[in-house]
Image (cartoon, helix red, strand yellow):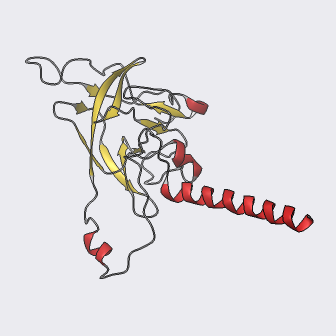
């Protein structure tokens, strides 16, 4: 009987480990906000392999816009997901302080960013390259993220999370329509919500 209990316990542990490994490797099948923006890559591909030949030579493009939310106008992805910056990231360092489990909650805004048509941004857009080769969008020198718990466009549940995650907004962010004749285009500015930004 003792062997049977030990066998059952080991089988349960192995099953739990397999589920954990699969979830980490394959992600989740439930909707996760921003999942399309945060990508990971496997190990390096062998030169000459079919996968290496099909690998993109330039980073994907990502379009950023301005969206009205319950806390005002914020920087967002083209699909409406609110964009955040992390106060532990060092401006202009070319590095992100968010890795591992952090990325499960805060997927990166992946790709080379550009402003949506008619949107003018007050700070510079750029990129960093993360370990593994993922290109992450930056704004004003800070890497950009979405929040996995923001399940619908325009949600801002991650704002001020742990006192370290913040939306990008500001007093000169305009609600004016981008295409209106004689109407100024939206302009995004980063606020000083936390020292350093």
Quadrant in which the N terminus is drawn:
bottom right
Instruction: Residue 180: give x, y in percent of width and height.
Output: 11, 19
Q: In the rendered view, tell whether residue 34 sits above or below residue 39.
A: above
Query: Residue placed at 36% from the left, 40% from the top?
Result: 140
Residue 69 x %, y %: 38, 20
Looking at the image, is 123 positioned above or below residue 35?
above
Q: How many marks?
A: 0
Q: Is residue 83 left or right of residue 100?
A: left
Name which quarter of the figure residue 44 lies in.
bottom left
Q: Is residue 173 left or right of residue 181?
A: right
Residue with the most extreme front position: 1
Q: Residue at x 50, y 27 (%)?
A: 157
In the displayed structure, would residue 152 be above or below residue 51?
Answer: above
Given residues 35 and 143, the one toward you in this image is 35
Residue sticking out furthest to the left: 181
Position of 90 compared to 70: left or right?
right
Residue, far bottom? 48
145 or 188, which is in the foreground?
145
Q: Residue at horizontal 59%, vertical 60%?
A: 21
Residue at image point 39% right, 32% down:
82
Q: What percent of the width, then of the height, locates residue 98?
A: 53, 49
Residue 74 left/right relative to 54:
right
Comparing 160 with 24, the one in front is 24
């Amino acid at each position: 009987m003792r062997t049977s209990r030990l066998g059952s316990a080991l089988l349960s542990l192995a099953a739990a480990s397999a589920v954990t490994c699969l979830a980490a490797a394959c992600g989740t099948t439930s909707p996760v906000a921003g999942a399309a923006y945060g990508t990971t890559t496997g190990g390096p591909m062998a030169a000459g392999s079919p996968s290496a030949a099909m690998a993109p030579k330039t980073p994907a493009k990502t379009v950023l816009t301005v969206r009205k939310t319950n806390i005002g106008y914020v920087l967002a992805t083209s699909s409406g997901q609110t964009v955040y910056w992390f106060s532990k990231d060092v401006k202009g360092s070319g590095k992100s302080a968010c890795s591992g489990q952090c990325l499960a909650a805060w997927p990166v805004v992946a790709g080379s960013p550009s402003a949506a048509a008619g949107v003018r941004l007050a700070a510079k857009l750029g990129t960093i390259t993360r370990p593994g080769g993922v290109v992450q969008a930056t704004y004003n020198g800070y890497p950009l993220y979405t929040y996995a718990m923001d399940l619908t466009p325009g949600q801002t549940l991650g704002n001020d999370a742990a006192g370290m995650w913040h939306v990008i907004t500001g007093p000169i962010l305009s609600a004016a329509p981008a295409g209106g004749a004689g109407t100024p285009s939206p302009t995004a500015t980063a606020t000083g919500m936390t020292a350093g930004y």
